[in-house]
Amino acid sequence: MKASIQDVAREAGVSVSTVSRTLSKPDLVLPRTRDKVLDAARKLEYHASRSASALKSGQSFRVALLSSLNIATWFNATALAGLDSVFHPNGYDISIFQMVDADKRHEFFADLPVRRNADAVVVNSFNIEPEETRQLRTMNVPIIGINIPSTGGFDAAVSIDDQHAMRVAVEHLISLGHRHIVYVYKMPNSSSRLQFSADSRLSGFLSACRSHPGATPETIAVSEDGDATNTVLNRITAMPSAPTAICFQSDDIALPTLFRLRQYGHRVPQDISIIGFDDIPFAQSIGLTTLRQDPFELGRKAATQTLDAIAGSTPEPQFEIAQAQLILRETTAAAA
């Protein structure tokens, strides 16, 4: 026969309310009493009902994570691991909602306030519009951001300073004598209406180049769905004069382009320097110079902010900015 909470109370010699408090908020119970209750629960193989606790507290013990289409990308998957490293030990589940297109996005923001089945909403790397913020506000739950383009409408956020990171990359290339520098970036997906934090890297690149009168920046936009490497190579070879350096919006574009350049006889970094962004696991083994960000730490910090906000506290810091780190390896050198 399955043990009940009353059985645990009798075994531990305490009241039912003390058992309930020990299992739901152990930090509020004296260590000696807590140990007695937990020992009794283990002995009787008692497991608290998650749904009963939720009904009693009015909480769902669930956090809604809004993410872009591909949750399996390096950044999204690693940020999710960071969130889970905090939420799981604290008894919270994560429900993932992928913003596939404009219709799915509208459906989510219209339906979530009706379901009210989350204690907080975490938005990963994209904007939410004023009307969407209003809809979320009707839930009366915290809204936390990871790497968001703007903090408007959010209760707290932790983000990378993407513009500053690109300025660091450009300054490094300028110091090596490069002046004709290309920036390669992914075109935003218009069907989803999502604006990503990474989009600001373009303005950071152009701003940094403009601060050096001798610099001649150029940009290449590639499609998410097409062959980005071929697009880059075709554009570069069509230029009147070859660039001496390329900055990439992300490592996942930089690495295949690096391989293709070498296949076609271009020496990296002797003929052309390359800088990526992210520092994904393959970047180190290939020797890619890149800008490192830590999505696991971003996720961990965002989860801590979320728990603070759920508890009714203002997270400190409320809006945290992290800096990307320039990792110098083997794909940048002095301009030829």
Image (spheres, rainbow, N blue to C red):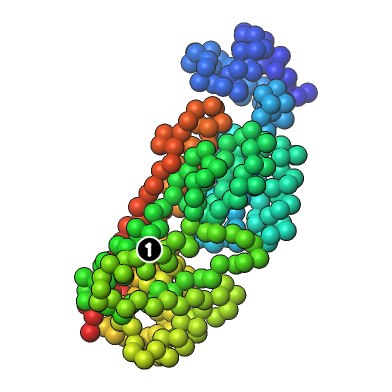
Q: Position of residue 228 (x, y in %)?
A: 51, 78
Q: Position of residue 9 (x, y in %)?
A: 66, 12
Vertical order, 234 against 139 (above or below): below
Q: In this rendering, does residue 124 appear at all?
A: yes
State the image quarter where residue 6 is shown. Answer: top right
Q: Nearer the viewer, residue 121 or 57?
A: 121
Q: Position of residue 208 (x, y in %)?
A: 31, 66
State the image quarter where residue 269 is shown. Answer: bottom left
Question: Which residue is found at the position 43% from the left and 41% from the top?
Answer: 319
Quarter of the figure with the C terminus: bottom left
Q: In this rendering, does residue 88 appear at all?
A: no
Question: Which residue is found at the position 39% from the left and 89% from the top?
Answer: 239
Q: Position of residue 203 (x, y in %)?
A: 41, 64
Vertical order, 178 against 265 (above or below): above
Question: Which residue is found at the position 50% from the left and 13% from the top?
Answer: 30
Left or right, 19 with reference to 104: left
Question: Which residue is found at the position 68% from the left and 61% from the top?
Answer: 101
Q: Nearer the viewer, residue 287 or 190?
A: 190
The amino acid sitting under disc 1 is: Gly
Circle 1 is placed at which residue position? 204
Q: Could you say whether the residue bearing mark 1 is in a helix, strand or loop?
A: helix
Q: Nearer the viewer, residue 276 or 3?
A: 276
Vertical order, 137 against 56 (above or below): below
User: How many numbered dots are placed on residues in this image?
Assistant: 1
Quarter of the figure with the N terminus: top right
Mark 1: give few (<14), some (14-19) or many (20+) Cα within 10 Å: many
State the image quarter where residue 274 is shown. Answer: bottom left
